[in-house]
Amino acid sequence: MEQFEALWAYQQEDIKADAIANAIRRSPTRLKLEKARDFILDRQKQYKQIESDIAAMVDRKDVIIQAIDHASSQLDGLKSRYAANPPQTAEEVKSLLSEVAKCRDTIRQYEAEIGHIARESAANEKAQRNVKIEAANAKKSFDQLKAEYEQESKVKKEELDAQRLKAKALLDTVDPALLEEYNTIKKHISPPMARLTYGQCSGCNTSLPSATLARIRGGALVECETCGRMIIQ
């Protein structure tokens, strides 16, 4: 029974330390800091995507310019062919005009696509500037929050270290086997120990069978079948 009480005393200090650690993790300043960090990462990803889109448009524009040059050369060739060897029949004239119209349509389509690319590029460049400004402003906020959190967490960390020492000071009184069991249970539920209260596990308020109650009152190590906690009287 004394061994259980020693472990219970250790749990009281251990849980206090955990509460401080949780308070540090759930700090509003830390949550704001994490949100600012995620925002910056998102804007960096967005900036790179826009950069990639712009590069792809530049490559496409180069290809289109080459295609326009090729279509223009074909058109010039048709003009030269007409000057050197004018069509003699209506069918030949019709065929030549069809080829000329096809070249001109191709050039117009490519020029329209270049215009679209130019508009998209301008929009992307504007979006890229806005993203850069947003990221820069977020970085300023992040740096300020970081400084605030470092100061805040420094105080809390000192409090946590002091509480951890209080818990550690009780370890010499705790049976190693019980401590190992305690730490194993704690991985799944906290606190890992509960008192027997009015025939119930105080951790989950489950009523225990008479045989289990007898074992607990007899000083046996019993784990709650519902929540898994170690139950002591």
Image (cartoon, rainbow, N blue to C red):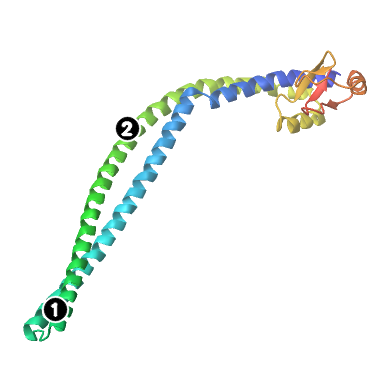
Crowding at mark 2 (Cα within 10 Å: few <14, some 14-19, many 20+): few
Decide if residue 35 is on the left or right side of residue 4.
Answer: left
Residue occupying the point 41% across, 32% down: 36
Decide if residue 144 is on the left or right side of residue 173.
Answer: left
Give 212 or 19, whichever is nearer the viewer: 212
Relative to 159, say whether 129 is above or below: below
Q: Quadrant of the image for the C terminus?
A: top right
Give 18 or 77, whichever is nearer the viewer: 77
Relative to 39, say whether 7 is above or below: above
**Where is residue 192, by image quadrant?**
top right
Q: Earlier in the sequence, mark 1 or mark 2?
A: 1
Can you give x and y, in whole percent of width and height, for residue 68 in the image?
19, 67
Give 54 or 38, whichever is nearer the viewer: 54
Can you give x and y, in whole percent of width and height, for residue 202 in the image?
77, 18
Determine the CA span between mark 1 and mark 2.
59 Å
SS class, disc 1: helix
Can you give x and y, in whole percent of width and height, for residue 120 in the image?
26, 50
Residue at the extreme front of the image, as rendered: 90
Q: Quadrant of the image for the N terminus?
A: top right
Q: Which three-letter amino acid code belongs to the residue tagged 1? A: Leu
Residue occupying the point 36% across, 29% down: 141
Q: Mark 2 sits on what residue?
A: 137
Q: Mark 1 sits on what residue?
A: 78
**Where is residue 138, by image quadrant?**
top left
The tag on residue 135 is none
